[in-house]
């Protein structure tokens, strides 16, 4: 090549770059559901079982197609996820030892696939080894049933969806480790499954394998379930809690378990509630965030590792649109599309590219990521944003 030809080629290339305008940073927004953290059961849905310290796409699962995502499991090798799509079908992936993927088998998989014969679904939830779906106001359940958490009057596991007995007009569903909570259209709350700490709210500690109404609890507009505790938000903006309370996750100033609903202290004008594994959160009408319960890894986000028996502010964190907490980490998405996380980070579940714990929020996804919701394995170390 002659010098003239080379120079002419470089000039042409520079001219094209000038027409294209200045270089732009990589666009943080992409269409996929993102997952990070533990992946021993393939729960990240990327075809591998390797842990991931930064958010990566779930194989073939477009965020715009997902109405709701719920994550279950109590260890890195038993975690799983279920995604409700806009067309009313459900896909699942991850661990499946108890049939919690709902595909009729007990074989796990590291990529999403359909839950057998399930359509017309409006809500989903996931426990440790069981999952739930609301269809036409009725609840279907599948997976482990050791404590009656499938609600069908038996103790036998089912790898395919079965009907929860005698419950209709259900508006929402939440799942703890081994219990479930259903909110009916009339504002009443019904529970079933394990009850050794009173997490069913029935005034007893007896397990139930069919739904039972929580007494004296009315005008409820939202429910949420931690591992062994439960929360309910009423129409007047106050919060009730019951069940396990060793770390103050009921928020009533004590560490005594409660088998019937108690008032969460110092809370009013609450717009959203989020029960995590052993800690709890509330978003106030003005956008402020309150936290209480277990905090050994800083997963309350208040800059300390001190557990709290009543709600405390999470400093500098406002405009939270969704939040989820696992064993001892928490993930939240803000109105600007940024995803923040705090607490334990041993498997990269905070998504910041490290394995360093943080008692204050760190960034997993930047503003403009496109994410509007998050999920976390029930009491494990895997995170999702969609």
Image (cartoon, helix red, strand yellow):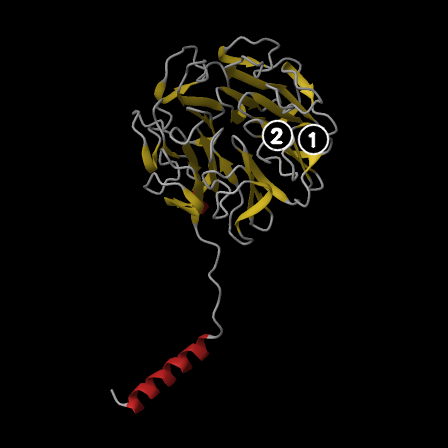
Q: Determine the residue positioned at 34% across, 87% down.
A: 7
CA separation in Å, label 1 and label 2? 9 Å
Front-most of 230 and 79? 79
Residue identifier under label 2: 280
The answer to which of marks 1 and 2 sits earlier in the sequence is: 2
- Report crowding for label 1: few under 14, some 14 to 19, many 20 or more residues within 10 A (C-alpha): many
Percent position (x, y) of residue 90? 39, 34
Determine whether, in the image, residue 5 is placed left or right of residue 78: left
Residue found farthest to the left? 1
- Helix or strand or loop: what does disc 2 sit on? strand
Q: Quadrant of the N terminus?
A: bottom left
**Residue placed under numbered mark 1 in the picture:** 311
| Residue 155 horizontal side relative to residue 189, left or right | left
- Determine the residue positioned at 69% across, 20% down: 254
The label number, if any, that marks residue 72 in the structure image: none
Towards the viewer: 355 or 171: 355
Q: Position of residue 40 (x, y in %)?
A: 37, 34
């Amino acid at each position: 090549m002659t010098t003239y030809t080379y120079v002419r080629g470089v000039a042409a290339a520079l001219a094209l770059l000038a027409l294209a305008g200045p270089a732009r940073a990589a666009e943080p927004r992409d269409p996929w559901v993102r997952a990070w953290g533990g992946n021993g059961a393939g729960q990240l849905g990327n075809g591998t079982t390797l842990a991931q310290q930064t958010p990566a796409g779930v194989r073939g699962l477009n965020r715009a197609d997902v109405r709701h995502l719920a994550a279950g499991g109590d260890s890195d090798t038993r975690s799983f996820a279920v995604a409700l799509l806009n067309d009313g079908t459900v896909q699942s992936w991850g661990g499946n030892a108890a049939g919690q993927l709902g595909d009729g088998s007990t074989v796990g998989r590291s990529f999403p696939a359909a839950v057998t014969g399930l359509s017309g679904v409006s809500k989903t939830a996931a426990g440790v080894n069981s999952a739930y779906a609301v269809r036409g106001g009725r609840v279907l359940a599948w997976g482990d049933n050791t404590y009656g958490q499938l609600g069908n009057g038996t103790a036998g596991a089912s790898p395919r969806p079965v009907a929860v007995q005698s419950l209709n007009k259900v508006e929402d569903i939440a799942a703890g480790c081994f219990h479930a909570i259903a909110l009916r259209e009339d504002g009443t709350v019904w529970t079933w499954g394990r009850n050794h700490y009173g997490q069913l709210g029935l005034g007893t500690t007896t397990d139930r394998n069919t739904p039972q109404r929580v007494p004296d609890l009315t005008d409820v507009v939202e429910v949420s379930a931690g591992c062994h505790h439960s929360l309910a938000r009423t129409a007047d903006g106050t919060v009730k809690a019951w069940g396990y309370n060793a770390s103050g996750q009921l928020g009533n100033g004590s560490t005594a378990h409660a088998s019937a609903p108690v008032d969460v202290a110092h809370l009013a004008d609450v717009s959203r509630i989020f029960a995590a594994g052993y800690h709890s959160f509330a978003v106030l009408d003005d956008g402020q965030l309150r936290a209480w319960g277990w905090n050994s890894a800083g997963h309350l986000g208040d800059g300390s590792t001190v557990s709290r028996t009543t709600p405390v502010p999470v400093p500098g964190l406002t405009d939270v649109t969704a939040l989820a907490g696992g064993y001892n980490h928490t993930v939240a998405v803000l109105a600007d599309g940024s995803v923040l996380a705090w607490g334990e980070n041993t498997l990269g579940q905070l998504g910041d590219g490290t394995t360093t714990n943080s008692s204050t929020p760190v960034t997993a996804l930047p503003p403009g990521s496109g994410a509007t919701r998050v999920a976390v394995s029930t009491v494990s170390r895997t995170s999702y944003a969609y």
